[in-house]
Image (cartoon, rainbow, N blue to C red):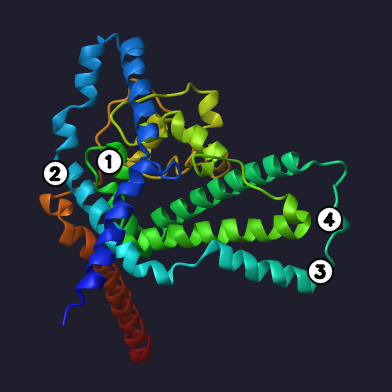
């Protein structure tokens, strides 16, 4: 028998999860970030393209982009994924739980520094807070780069990340076009990085550790989001120029990453900082004049259906696994015959 109370509670949490995407400052598509992206995009089109404000706004709200089959799939994934992640939530590692375990582990293995209860070289609590906040932002960004790159280069992970790259039209909500398996992996990455850094900093500096936030988000993340991070998934190619793009990933650079052209497939994995791409030899500079087609080769209409987006990655992984087994069997049979 269906528990009506449980269904109501689940539906309420599901609805709250969806609404929180645009009402919480820790979310990329927080309404204030969307508004700032709109203002920046409009200013760019007027300044660089010479469009009138009315024309620029009509361009930005082109219904063929926002209501394409690709964008419709983005919205469907956004909604359904919130329910899926609610179900999977008990399986997601908590950064605070990990931080607690690591902190006690450090306490047992090492002698706690004398400065943990005082000031290290005159460092104030505010200085430590800035150091912690910046370190968390930089290390988290680096981990995003390396996991993102791995998801492109390891076929098993690419099968799931491919869901994101089948998008043929880009809107700010395309950032949420992800398979739940990818969501779990990035959630695990976040928990490990943040939990580890929290444990280390609390071990070193005790109660002097605090995170500087704006609207509930790391202040550096909030700044980047407020400066147009949502335009990465858009058709407005804002580039920063060659020098700045050596240090920061521009919207136009991330759009190159979504290009269907093969020579763009292995580039610009970074989220905010371009240094990781430079170190990994995957950095490609962009142009505000670039004309791109987005997606992956041979995308059919079925690629934008929920059933295909959810189940095809598992099918691809199974076929790849079966193919490897068949090859291994043939090699072993050939060797035994020899």
Identify the residue position indicated by label 4 in the image.
Answer: 117
Q: CA distance from mark 1 to mark 3?
A: 51 Å
Q: CA distance from mark 4 to mark 2?
A: 58 Å
Identify the residue position indicated by label 2 in the image.
Answer: 69
Q: In this rendered view, identify the residue nearer to me: 111 or 332.
A: 111
The correct choice, above or below, for 16 with respect to 67 in the image is below
Q: Residue at x 23, y 62 (%)?
A: 310
- The nearer-to-camera label among 1 and 3 is 3
Kindly state the secondary structure of the residue where label 1 is placed: loop
Kindly state the secondary structure of the residue where label 3 is placed: loop
Dot placed on the residue nearer the N-terminal end, 1 or 4: 4
Kindly state the secondary structure of the residue where label 4 is placed: helix
Q: How many marks?
A: 4
Do the CB atoms of the residues marked 4 and 3 lie less than 8 Å apart?
no
Look at the image and tell me in which quarter the N terminus lies: bottom left
Q: Residue at x 44, y 57 (%)?
A: 186
Q: Which mark is residue 110?
A: 3
Q: In this rendered view, identify the residue nearer to me: 134 or 249.
A: 134
Do the CB atoms of the residues marked 4 and 2 lie less than 8 Å apart?
no
């Amino acid at each position: 028998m269906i528990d009506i109370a449980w269904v109501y509670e689940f539906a309420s949490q599901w609805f709250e999860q969806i609404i929180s995407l645009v009402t919480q400052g820790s979310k990329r598509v927080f309404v204030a970030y969307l508004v700032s992206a709109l203002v920046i995009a409009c200013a760019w089109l007027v300044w660089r393209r010479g469009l009138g404000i009315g024309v620029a706004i009509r361009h930005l709200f082109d219904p063929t982009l926002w209501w394409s089959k690709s964008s419709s799939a983005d919205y469907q994934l956004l909604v359904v994924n919130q329910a899926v992640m609610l179900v999977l939530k008990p399986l997601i590692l908590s950064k605070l739980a990990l931080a607690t375990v690591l902190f006690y582990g450090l306490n047992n293995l090492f002698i706690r520094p004398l400065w943990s209860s005082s000031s290290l070289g005159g460092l104030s609590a505010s200085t430590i807070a800035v150091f912690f906040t910046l370190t968390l932002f930089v290390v988290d960004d680096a981990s995003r780069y390396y996991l993102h790159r791995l998801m492109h280069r390891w076929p098993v992970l690419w099968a799931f990340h491919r869901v994101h790259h089948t998008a043929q039209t880009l809107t700010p909500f395309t950032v949420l076009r992800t398979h739940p398996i990818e969501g779990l992996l990035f959630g695990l990455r976040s928990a490990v990085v943040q939990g580890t850094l929290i444990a280390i900093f609390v071990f070193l500096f005790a109660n002097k550790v605090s995170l500087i936030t704006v609207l509930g988000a790391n202040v550096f993340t909030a700044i980047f989001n407020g400066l147009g991070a949502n335009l990465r998934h858009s058709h407005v190619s804002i580039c920063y120029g060659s020098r700045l793009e050596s240090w920061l990933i521009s919207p136009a650079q991330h759009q190159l990453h979504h290009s269907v052209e093969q020579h763009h497939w292995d580039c610009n994995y970074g989220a905010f900082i371009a240094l990781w791409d430079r170190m990994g030899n995957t950095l490609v500079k962009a142009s505000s004049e670039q004309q791109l087609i987005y997606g992956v080769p041979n995308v059919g209409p079925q690629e934008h259906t929920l059933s295909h987006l959810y189940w095809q990655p598992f099918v691809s992984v199974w076929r790849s696994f079966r193919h490897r087994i068949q090859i291994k069997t043939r090699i072993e049979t050939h060797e035994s015959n020899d």
